[in-house]
Image: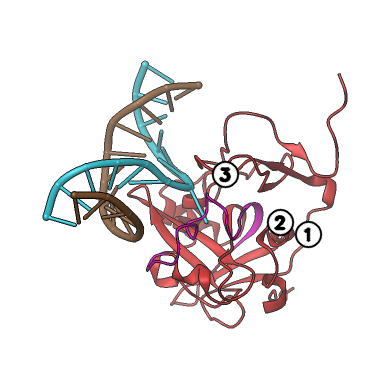
Chain colours: A red, B cyan, C brown
DNA sequence: CGTTGGATTGGCT
DNA sequence: GCCAATCCAACGC
């Protein structure tokens, strides 16, 4: 069953709404030779306008320019000397906002993913933002790719996570903007990333029981 | 033009 | 659990 692509209007919302709604949808990558790779999104993070943890916080640069453009495009950047990261642009032109794709459950093309990753255990293929880019051959060439109309990468409707299966935590690896609970993950999913040390995930829509 | 540090990972203790 | 690797964009001089 070929899923429907997510529409432009899906992305034209605050990243904090797009990020949890992406859980359960499917990232599809088609290589130049036609090979199809796919995975179900199980972990995301939101970055919003005015957010000190966002690459766009200090204004537009060559690197982050895609974040300032129209929604539904892929923002790909390089960090830590080795790793590409992929994000989905949200909101509107001039409102820099994005959702970092942090982990996938591999669905299609797992043998090729293992080859690109240099390791084969399913949980090691896409369980981190750098890992999933390596597994799906995402790099600078896909920076700015149109997820609604482009041929190489897009998102399809999947089975959305039910609300009380979504947990939230602070974002991983950021030194500012640590307060907001803008990391969203499917609770107890084995394919999520290593994550951050510290307070445990909260279940969305539930409050901790009083001691 | 030199410096700084990063939306991480993999390997080792 | 802890830490080094590794390169480049951003920024200051």
Given residues A99 and A32, the one toward you in this image is A99
Which residue shows up at 61% across the image and 58% down it? A48
- The residue wearing badge 3 is A177
Given residues A29 and A51, the one toward you in this image is A51
**Residue C2, image x, y percentages:** 42, 22
Which residue shows up at 78% across the image and 61% down it? A159
- The residue wearing badge 2 is A23
The answer to if A56 sits in the magenta stretch is yes
- The residue wearing badge 1 is A160
Dot 1 and dot 2 residues touching (CB under 8 Å) = yes
Image height of A91 relative to A46, above or below: below
**Residue A33, image x, y percentages:** 44, 77
User: Between tags 1 and 3, which lies in front?
Assistant: 3
User: Tag 2's secondary structure?
Assistant: loop
Image height of A115 relative to B9, above or below: below
Which residue shows up at 83% across the image and 51% down it? A163
User: Between tags 3 and 2, which lies in front?
Assistant: 3
* Mark 3, other Cα within 10 Å: few <14 / some 14–19 / many ≥20: some
User: Magenta part of the protein: which range?
Assistant: A38-63
Residue A195 falls left or right of residue A185: left
Examine the image and state in which quarter residue A84 appears: bottom left
Given residues A49 and A149, the one toward you in this image is A49
Residue A169 falls left or right of residue B2: right
Which residue shows up at 63% across the image and 45% down it? A191
Spatial distance from mark 3 to mark 2, Cα to Cα? 22 Å
* Mark 1, other Cα within 10 Å: few <14 / some 14–19 / many ≥20: some
């Amino acid at each position: 069953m070929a899923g429907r692509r997510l529409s432009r209007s899906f992305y034209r919302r605050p990243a904090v709404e797009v990020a949890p709604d992406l859980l359960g949808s499917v990232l599809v990558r088609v290589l130049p030779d036609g090979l199809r790779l796919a995975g179900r999104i199980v972990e995301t993070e939101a970055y919003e306008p005015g957010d000190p943890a966002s690459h766009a916080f200090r204004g537009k640069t060559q690197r982050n320019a895609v974040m300032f453009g129209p929604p539904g495009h892929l923002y790909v950047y390089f960090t830590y000397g080795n790793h590409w990261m992929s994000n989905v642009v949200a909101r509107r032109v001039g409102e820099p906002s994005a959702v970092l794709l942090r982990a996938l459950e591999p669905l299609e093309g797992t043998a090729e993913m293992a080859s690109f990753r240099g390791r084969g255990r399913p949980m090691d293929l896409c369980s981190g933002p750098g890992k999933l880019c390596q597994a799906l051959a995402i790099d600078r060439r896909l920076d700015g790719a149109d997820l609604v109309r482009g041929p190489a990468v897009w998102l399809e409707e999947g089975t959305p996570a039910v609300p009380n299966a979504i947990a939230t935590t602070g974002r991983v690896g950021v030194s500012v903007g640590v307060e907001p609970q803008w990391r969203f993950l499917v609770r107890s999913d084995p394919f999520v990333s290593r994550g951050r040390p510290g307070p445990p995930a909260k279940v969305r829509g539930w409050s901790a029981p009083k001691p």
